[in-house]
Amino acid sequence: MTKVAFITGASSGMGKSTAEILLQQGYKVYGAARRVDRMQELQDKGMGVVALDLTEDASIVEAVATLLKKESRIDILINNAGYGSYGSVEEVPIEEAKRQFEVNIFGLARLTQLVIPTMRKQKSGRIVNISSMGGKIYTPFGAWYHATKFALEGWSDCLRLELKQFGIDVVVVEPGGIKTEWGGIAMESLKKVSGSGPYAHLVNKVVASMDTTNDKLTPVEVLGKEIAKAATVEKPKTRYLKGYLAKPLVGMRKWLGDKTFDKMILSQLK
């Protein structure tokens, strides 16, 4: 029996890399994204393609129904889709903050709700939630993004306890700095929202700091392999922390007090 994997945000970055690896490993892979045309390369390699907008309930329902109609089972769900909305808390419109939660938490949760009954009936399954080291640490101007990832961490822990009785694993992957489109999009958001207001001075430092780290970021393929491992290894860990600065920063956050960690973060922006 060929196992079926469903990956959101498969049109680029970590989702695309993971899809390619699982295809090579012999899984039947379905990739979902808003930009279906960007998944043509993977479709040519044998991946099924599903249109999905995590801000639209009807789109989520249709995506899961389409997959189940074709395969009747889902063995692996990788909740990878998400983005970073950056800007000062004062200046980010609440509507944008709500959209950040809609994509990164509520859309992800709705999709998971719809997949769980099938996994329960199978008495097996693996749900892999792509969080971030940003679910354990914090940085200036990422309040809404960090809030969604902190939420995802706690949500995943509760889900893991609930689904254990049905033979369903819940795993969290926490990427550090990765070479994807994510960073550029987040910094453009930051400059647009807060680049010319009262926070401009610190914003410019954050953007400059991001520019200096671009060459140090972890290749996306490394995370693709890590996510694929988290999705397929027989006995998964509850969390996988991987990528540039992930382990040192999360370690420091764990052991340093709030004020010391604050100073450490701000000292990098002088």
Image: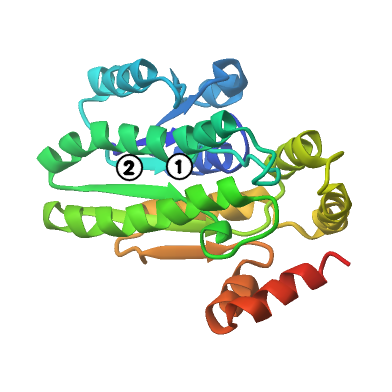
In the displayed structure image, the side of residue 154 where residue 168 appears, left or right: left
Nearest to the observer: residue 41 or residue 68: 68
Nearest to the observer: residue 140 or residue 5: 140
Judged from the image, the secondary structure of the residue bearing numbered disc 1 is helix
Residue pointed to by mark 2 = 76
- Is there any visible trace of residue 28 in the rendered image? no
Local crowd at mark 1 within 10 Å, few (<14), some, or many (≥20)? many
In the displayed structure image, the side of residue 189 where residue 43 appears, left or right: left
Tell me the quarter of the picture where residue 236 sits: bottom left
The residue depicted at 48 percent of the width and 39 percent of the height is: 104
The residue depicted at 87 percent of the width and 56 percent of the height is: 205
Where the N terminus falls, by quadrant? top left
Residue pointed to by mark 1 = 22
Q: State the scheme by which the image is colored.
A: rainbow
Task: Give percent across and percent down for residue 241.
Answer: 52, 65
Nearest to the observer: residue 10 or residue 221: 10
In the displayed structure image, the side of residue 249 where residue 217 appears, left or right: right
Task: Give percent across and percent down for residue 35.
Answer: 57, 19
Distance between mark 2 and mark 1 Cα atoms: 11 Å
Amino acid type of the residue tagged 2 in the rendering? Ile
The residue depicted at 46 percent of the width and 26 percent of the height is: 32
In the displayed structure image, the side of residue 200 where residue 62 appears, left or right: left
Amino acid type of the residue tagged 1 in the rendering? Leu
Task: Give percent across and percent down for residue 209.
Answer: 84, 58
Residue 58, placed above or below residue 88: above
Q: Residue 178 carries which label?
A: none
